[in-house]
């Protein structure tokens, strides 16, 4: 028990978590602290470039095995299935109407790359190694949940209503698969893989040395956005919906734990897969939902994903998922 | 100087829908438009601001389009088909321009 408490404390007192808390507190206190939008987007691009590149370089060093293909398939399956589970729970356990429940469910089937990055840094701080190709799994898990969310929202509508809307409302496959964050992740991963250790040595001053500092600044921005969202939107949600943002990650984590055991993953890789399953998107999926399910209230899904689940995962989830993976590997 | 009567359409729309809206304008024969970035605002779902946004969801843009009255109905129908269920505003006004052949 002492070990768990020490690990939790170490995580909570890490700079990245504390900068998130600073941003959250500043926003709740209505400070005028803000990160200019172009700069915030640049930070996001940097983080995806860096994590993708380092993942690819790590795969070049360690080599590939059949586990990657199985892991990608498992990740895609999770991304398709978890929204259906989330939707079913929301329809029973929350007052959200169908379209809002479907939009929220899509977020919880997709992934948060920043949560993944934070989890990677936590594992490194605990000297727990993991496979670099988890980045590719993260990229694969981003999009399928969008399709499930759309299907869940449209299922059960009359044929006439569905046919009137479907073609015009569906995001195109280009919009989904060529989403900027996926392109950057996969592209940087491929470049890191191709250039290998030499490429990493060349890029290290850019992708390794400044990484933690940039991550801290980005988490400060995430805290600001989460705080603003909580301030303006918490009243729209109700306790049952808010609680979903805490227990759904735990449900997803438990399901992913089964996959970890089935595939025989290492502790670190297992922890990251569980983290991916337990995270919720707030970059790619919100944009897709504005196209596909415009009636869904962005104040609800954005606040749940960023204002409730992300802080929960950052503070408690990540060390918990690492402990879960360690228990079965 | 002679002035010519035209129609001005201003569309304030969510950024994820921007491409679809401009595609609709292009298909309706509109000769041109200008896209402006919104900094923030407030509406039925509360206030928002552009600072810190990392997703295009939640970001708003304004499209200003000036066109001849002959194309107005077609353009407005094309715009409405895209934006009717989105967060946004479409406003129409009568304006006068200097160079009629530009629109």
Image (cartoon, grey):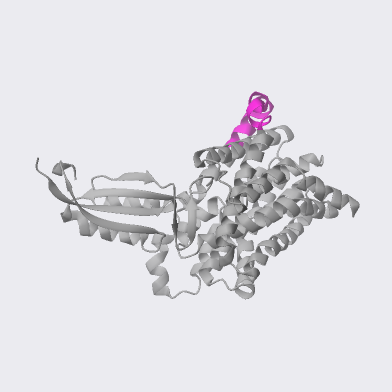
Q: Is residue A206 magenta?
A: yes
Quadrant where the image shows the N terminus of chain A: bottom right
Horizontal side of residue A17 vs A327, given as left or right: left
> Against A57, is A244 above or below?
below
Q: Position of residue A202 (x, y in %)?
A: 64, 23
Residue A208 visible in the shown view: yes
- Residue at left offset 64%, top offset 33%: A193
Where's residue A288, x and y in %? 49, 55
- Residue A242 position (above or below residue A261): below
> Which residue is more in the foreground, A171 or A7?
A7
Residue A208 placement, left or right of A174: right
Q: Quadrant of residue A105?
A: bottom right
Task: Report the label total.
Answer: 0
Magenta span: A188-210
Q: Which residue is at 55% across, 41% downward?
A: A35
Query: Would you say residue A65 is visible in this rendering?
Result: no
Q: Vertical placement of A233 versus B17: above or below?
A: below
Q: Residue furthest left?
A: B2
Q: Residue furthest right?
A: A2
A174 in the magenta segment: no
Residue A120 occupies which quadrant of the picture? top right
Q: Residue at x 37, y 52 (%)?
A: B20
Q: Main secondary structure of the magenta part?
A: helix
- Front residue of A212 and A15: A15
Residue A13 in the image, given as x and y percentages of width and height: 77, 45
Residue B22 against residue A236 in the figure, above or below? above
Residue A214 location (% of width, % of height): 64, 36
């Amino acid at each position: 028990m002492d070990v768990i408490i020490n690990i939790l404390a170490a995580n909570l007192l890490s700079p990245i978590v504390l900068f998130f808390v600073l941003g959250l507190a500043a926003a709740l206190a209505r400070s005028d602290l803000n990160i200019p939008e172009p700069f915030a987007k640049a930070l996001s691009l940097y983080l995806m470039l860096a994590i993708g590149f380092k993942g690819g370089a790590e795969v070049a060093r360690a080599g590939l095995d059949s586990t990657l293909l199985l892991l990608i398939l498992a990740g895609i399956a999770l991304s398709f299935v978890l929204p259906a589970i989330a939707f079913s729970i929301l329809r029973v356990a929350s007052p959200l109407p169908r379209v809002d429940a479907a939009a929220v469910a899509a977020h919880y089937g997709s992934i948060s790359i920043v949560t993944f990055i934070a989890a990677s840094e936590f594992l490194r701080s605990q000297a727990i190694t993991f496979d670099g190709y988890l980045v590719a799994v993260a990229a694969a898990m981003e999009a399928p949940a969008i399709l499930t969310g759309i299907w869940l929202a449209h299922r059960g509508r009359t044929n006439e209503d569905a046919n009137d809307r479907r073609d015009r409302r569906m995001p195109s496959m280009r919009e989904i698969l060529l989403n900027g964050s996926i392109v950057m992740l996969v592209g940087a991963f491929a470049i890191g893989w191709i250039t290998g250790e030499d490429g990493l040595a060349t890029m290290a001053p850019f992708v390794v040395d400044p990484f933690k500092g940039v991550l801290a600044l980005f988490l400060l921005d995430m805290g600001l956005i989460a705080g603003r969202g909580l301030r303006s939107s918490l009243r729209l949600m109700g306790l049952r919906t808010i609680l979903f943002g805490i227990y759904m990650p735990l449900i997803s984590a438990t399901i992913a734990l089964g996959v970890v055991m089935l595939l025989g993953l290492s502790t670190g890789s297992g922890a990251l897969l569980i983290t991916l399953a337990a995270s919720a998107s707030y970059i790619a999926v919100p944009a897709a939902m504005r196209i596909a399910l415009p009636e869904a209230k962005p104040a609800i899904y954005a606040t749940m994903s960023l204002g409730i689940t992300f802080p929960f995962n950052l503070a408690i989830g990540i060390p918990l998922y690492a402990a879960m993976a360690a228990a079965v590997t | 100087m002679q002035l010519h009567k035209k129609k001005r359409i201003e569309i304030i729309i969510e950024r994820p829908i921007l491409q679809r809206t401009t595609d609709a304008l292009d298909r309706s024969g509109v000769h041109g438009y200008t896209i402006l970035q919104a900094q923030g605002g407030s509406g039925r779902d509360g206030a928002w601001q552009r600072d810190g946004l990392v997703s295009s969801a939640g970001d708003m843009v304004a499209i200003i389009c000036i066109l001849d009255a002959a194309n107005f109905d077609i353009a407005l129908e094309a715009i409405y088909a895209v934006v009717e269920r989105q967060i946004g505003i479409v406003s129409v006004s009568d304006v006068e321009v200097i160079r009629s052949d530009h629109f």
